[in-house]
């Protein structure tokens, strides 16, 4: 295998999906028949992008005192861009046309942003919940919605 060749790149990227398949195959209690390898991949990838989201949110709102709505928006934009690329390439291994996928993904993200990122997190903040906790709670709702949208709408086969 030549490093940098297309075949080498495909093999190097395929390890992630294969690792998810191996882990899911070993799940106990029959969960291996319920949990898709792409779900595990989504959880791993989006845990990382969610950490990125919280880091940027903390820097902007907690350190630089940027208003919460603006800070959430910027942090989310960074995270959703990373999530799209990583899920497209290493998790769902999509070979569909990028333009239509990005267009659908943007619609999914706008709905997610309005409903969960701003809606739920701002509502929880208005109830007096600390902003990290509010964002984490909104993130749980967001995760379920985003996985379903990515698997069955954005990266459908």
Image (spheres, rainbow, N blue to C red):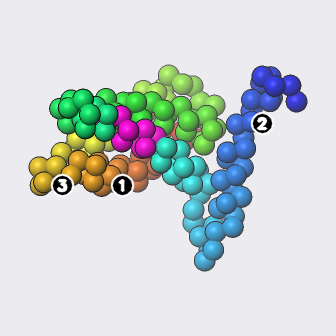
Q: Residues within 10 Å of mark 1 (few under 14, many from 20)?
A: few
Image-based side of 122 in relation to 7, left or right: left
Mark 3 lies on residue: 129
For the C terminus, the image quarter is top right
**Residue 152, position as x, y percentages in the image:** 49, 46
Image-based side of 122 in relation to 45, left or right: left
- Residue that extends furthest to the right in the rendered view of this protein: 1
User: In this view of the protein, can residue 143 be seen by the observer?
Assistant: yes
| The residue stretch that appears in magenta | 49-57
Q: Quadrant of residue 115?
A: top left
Of the numbered discs 2 and 3, the one sitting upstream in the chain is: 2
The residue nearer to you, when weighing 105 against 128, is 128
Given this view, does label 2 or label 3 mark the residue nearer the observer?
3
Mark 2 lies on residue: 11
Image-based side of 148 in relation to 155, left or right: left
Which type of secondary structure does the marked residue at label 3 adopt? loop
For the N terminus, the image quarter is top right
User: What is the distance, in whole Å, between disc 2 and disc 3 at their CAs?
Assistant: 45 Å
**Residue 150, position as x, y percentages in the image:** 48, 43
Mark 1 lies on residue: 140
């Amino acid at each position: 295998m030549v490093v940098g060749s297309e075949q080498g790149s495909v093999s190097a990227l395929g390890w992630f999906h294969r690792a998810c398949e191996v882990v899911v195959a070993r799940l106990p209690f029959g969960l291996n028949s319920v949990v898709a390898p792409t779900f595990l991949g989504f959880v791993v990838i989006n845990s990382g992008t969610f950490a990125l989201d919280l880091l940027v949110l903390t820097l902007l709102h907690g350190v630089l005192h940027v208003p919460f709505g603006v800070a959430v928006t910027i942090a989310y934009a960074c995270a959703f861009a990373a999530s799209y690329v990583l899920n497209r390439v290493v998790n769902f291994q999509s070979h569909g046309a990028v333009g239509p996928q990005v267009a659908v993904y943007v619609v999914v993200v706008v709905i997610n942003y309005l409903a969960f990122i701003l809606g739920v997190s701002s509502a929880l903040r208005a109830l007096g919940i600390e902003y990290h906790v509010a964002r984490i709670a909104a993130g749980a709702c967001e995760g379920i919605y985003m996985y379903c949208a990515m698997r069955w709408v954005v990266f459908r086969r």
